[in-house]
Amino acid sequence: MTVPYPVDYGGVVDLFYKLPALHKQGVSIHLHCFRNNRPEQEKLNDYCVSVNYYDRQIGHKGFMPGLPYMVSSRKNEELLDNLLKDDYPILMEGVQCTWLLNDKRFANRNTYVRIHNVEQDYYYQLFESANSLLHKIYYRWESYQLKKYEQSIVSKATAFWGVTEKDVAVYRNRLGCKTIDYLPVYLPENQDIKCREGKGNYCLYHGDLSVDTNEKAVIWLLENVFNIIQVPFVIAGKNPSARLEKMAHAQDYTCLVANPGEREMQDMVSKAHIHILPSFSKTGIKLKLLNALFNGRYVIVNKHTVDGSGLEELCTVAGNASEFREHIKNLFDTPFHEKQSLHRKNLLGTIFSNERNAIQQVQWIWGV
C-alpha cells in the first residue's frame, strides 16, 4: 500500500482506519508500504509491530512487458525478501500491490487482496475522461493490460474482498473469481452523523481535482447545470488545473477553493446545503459521498455515484443535467431535518462498522 497517513485524501481512508480496528482485535501488523512521495509516519507505529518503507520504480524503469505499470512499478526485491522471512498471512491493498502472486515462492502462502476498484474499468473511464493525449494513451494501454492481468490473478490468491457489491459481482461473474466477498470500507473511528439541521449557504462539489474523472464531473456541472441556475456553487479540492480555475472564476455564482486543509474542507462540507456529486467512474465507492452523508445535508448524485453502494435511498438521484437543476431548485430552500439525520444513522450504522469489519476479516483469515 501507499503510506496511509496522514488521511488527507479518500484513497487512504480505508487503508489507515483498518489498522487500529485490526489492532484492537489483537492482530500483530507488519506494515509494508510504498512512499509515493509521502514521508515516513511515526503514527503508524501505534498500531503496527513493524513498518517498512519502499520506493517504486518510477518512469521507464517501472515498465515490464505484459504487465500493468501500476503492478510492475511496485515489484521490489527487498519487499519480497522481507515477506519471505516469515509465514504470516499477506494482505495486499489493491491490485497494484499483487506482484507477489506471480512469484512461485509465495504459491503456498495465505494471500488476500483488497479490491479498491475493478481497475480495468476504472482506467478505461480515466481514458474516456482525460483531456491530455498522453494521459489518454497511458490510461488506454493500462486498461488493456489490466484486463488481462486481473483475469490472470483471480485464482492465485486465497481470497479477495471488494468495497462494493457491484465490484464483487463483476469479479465473480465476469472474471470467474470464486473466492471474493464484500467487505465495507473502514471509516474514521467513532464516525457519527454530524449533519446540521436547517439551511446551508451553497452547493458543494469536493474531491481530488487532479483526477481526470473528477475534473470532468466539475466541468460538466459548470457547463450544464450552474451556467443556467443562479445558485452559489463552491468547488473544493486538491490541485485544480489552470483550465478548471479559469472556468470556475468566469461564472458569477461559482468559486473554487484550491488545496484546502482537512479542517477547512470539513467546515465547507458541514456548511453546504446541497452536495452535488455526479461521477463518471462506475467502480469502487466514493469516499466523498460517505463524507457528505455523515457530515453534510442534502446530496444529489447520478447513478454511477451510488450504484452497488446500498446508499441510493439516502441520496437524490438525477439522470441528466435538467434533473440536477430541478432537484437543486427544489432542495435549496428546503431545510434539512433531524428525522433525515436519524434515517442516515440507522442505515449507515448497519453497513459500516470498523469493529464488525475487523472481526469478519479475522474470521476469514484465521477462522476465529
Image (spheres, rainbow, N blue to C red):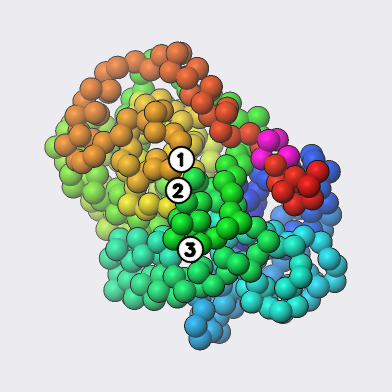
Q: Nearer the viewer, residue 242 or 24?
A: 24
User: Is 332 displayed left or right of 171 in the figure?
Assistant: left
Tell me the number on the disc at residue 166. 2
Q: Which residue, given by chain and number where applicable, does mark 1 sit on? A: 309
**SS assignment at label 2:** helix
Quadrant of the image for the C terminus? top right
Picture layout, residue 160 above or below residue 198: below
**SS assignment at label 1:** loop
SS assignment for the magenta stretch, majority: helix
Q: Nearer the viewer, residue 246 or 93?
A: 93
Q: Earlier in the sequence, mark 2 or mark 1?
A: 2
Residue farthest to the left, as pictured = 228
Q: Which residue, given by chain and number where applicable, does mark 3 sit on? A: 175
Q: Are marks 2 and 3 in contact (CB under 8 Å)?
A: no
How many angstroms separate mark 2 from mark 1 (CA)?
8 Å
Tell me the magenta residue range: 355-359
Determine the residue positioned at 58% across, 34% down.
352
* Residue 195 visible from this viewpoint: yes
Which of pointers 1 and 3 indicates the residue nearer the eye?
3
